[in-house]
Image: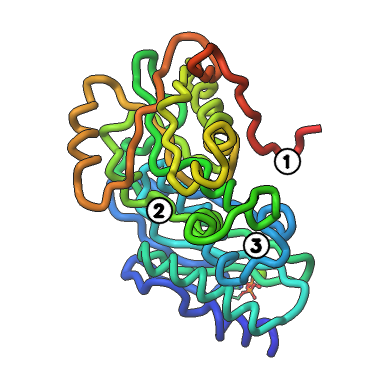
Amino acid sequence: MGEFELIDRYFAQLGARRGDVALGVGDDAALLTVPPGHELVSCVDTLVAGHHFPLDQHPDDIGWRSLAVNLSDLAAMGAQPAWATLALTLPELDEEWLEGFAAGFAALANQHQVALVGGDTTRGPLTISVQAMGTVPAGTALRRSTARPGDLVYVTGWPGDAAAGLALLQGRLQGQGANRGALELKFRRPEPRVVFGTRLRGIASSCIDVSDGLAADLGRLVAASGVGAVIRAAELPLSRALYALAGESRAREFALGGGDDYELVYTVAPSARSALFALAASAGAPACHCIGEIVAGRGVRVLGERGELPVPPGWDHFRV
Ligand code: ADP
Ligand code: MG
């Protein structure tokens, strides 16, 4: 099988069929129609084997994750996902791997009506770059730079679970049974908060997704906004599985410092709280927890019962 047969077999028809794809895989570039009055929202993320996922991870999970991390970025902008491109660098032509990868990618793409519209395929150390594109009504995208003092800080879901799942896979945390399965699944198959992100438009005053750790990503949001945040450790949502396997204090460390959550951290002005309550009570909305507030100043402070707790650093590829 050559390069073009490979593309044809696994990637030419992947994901949703969309009327706004005037030209998809097969030409020199794709032609996409952005609806009138909307802005194009575009992001890209690269996964390098051994750095962003364990070398022995299932190809299905790698395919899923490579799209999930990008859909999470679109969700944090409040964008409706539509299209993706895929730059794939492969050490060898392994059909079983390709089949699994394409299946995992397609499962998430179909769930969110994303069409794969192009890409590039080369040989080299396993590296996957996915570009995701979506749309928002012009002027309505969520940003990380618009939080204001007095806004409340919320997080979706159960931060820390995915990091604990990775720790289980790597033997840094012990546990068996349903709790182990639940945490590992959070790492293997993150569910980006796509629908919820779009519904936060007009309600959240700012938003960021959690990829490098709750404290670190909230730190980026407050730095971009020129404000500070105070988080109450007691309000951090800890899943039952995480609490059971890690114990309270280590669970909190996972929740604050662990990465790979792909949850949303967002701020809401007091005047928008009732709109948020209505949204949170609607069908399909994820769990939402208020964990603190935005203050004048800078940085993220975490208050425990007996004073301030150390803030864990997030993942940084170039930290020395
Ligand atoms: P070109 O040489 O013009 O850049 P390529 O030979 O790289 O084109 O790719 C041929 C077509 O296949 C293009 O439409 C490209 O977008 C698509 N393509 C290549 N690799 C992938 C991939 N991994 N996934 C999806 N589409 C791909
Ligand atoms: Mg090319």
The quarter of the rendered structure image containing the N terminus is: bottom right
**Does the residue at mark 2 contact the one at mark 1 (Cβ under 8 Å)?**
no
- Residue 272 visible, this orientation: yes
Upstream in sequence: badge 2 or badge 3: 3
Badge 2 amino acid: Gly
- The secondary element bearing badge 1 is classed as loop
Indicate which disc residue 128 carries. 3
Q: Say how the picture is coloured.
A: rainbow
Q: Nearer the viewer, residue 46 or 272?
A: 272
Q: Position of residue 302 (x, y in %)?
A: 52, 20
State the residue position of label 1. 317
Name which residue lies at 62% across and 78% down: 98
Residue 112 found in image quarter: bottom left
State the residue position of label 2. 134
Q: Position of residue 289 (x, y in %)?
A: 35, 33
Q: CA distance from mark 1 to mark 3?
A: 17 Å
Task: Estimate how packed mark 3 is, as few (under 14), some (14 to 19) or many (20 or more) residues with alpha carbons within 10 Å.
Answer: many
Name which residue lies at 37% across and 47% down: 79
- Residue 305 vs 108, above or below: the answer is above
- The secondary element bearing badge 3 is classed as strand
Task: Estimate how packed mark 1 is, as few (under 14), some (14 to 19) or many (20 or more) residues with alpha carbons within 10 Å.
Answer: few
- Residue 11 vs 208, above or below: the answer is below
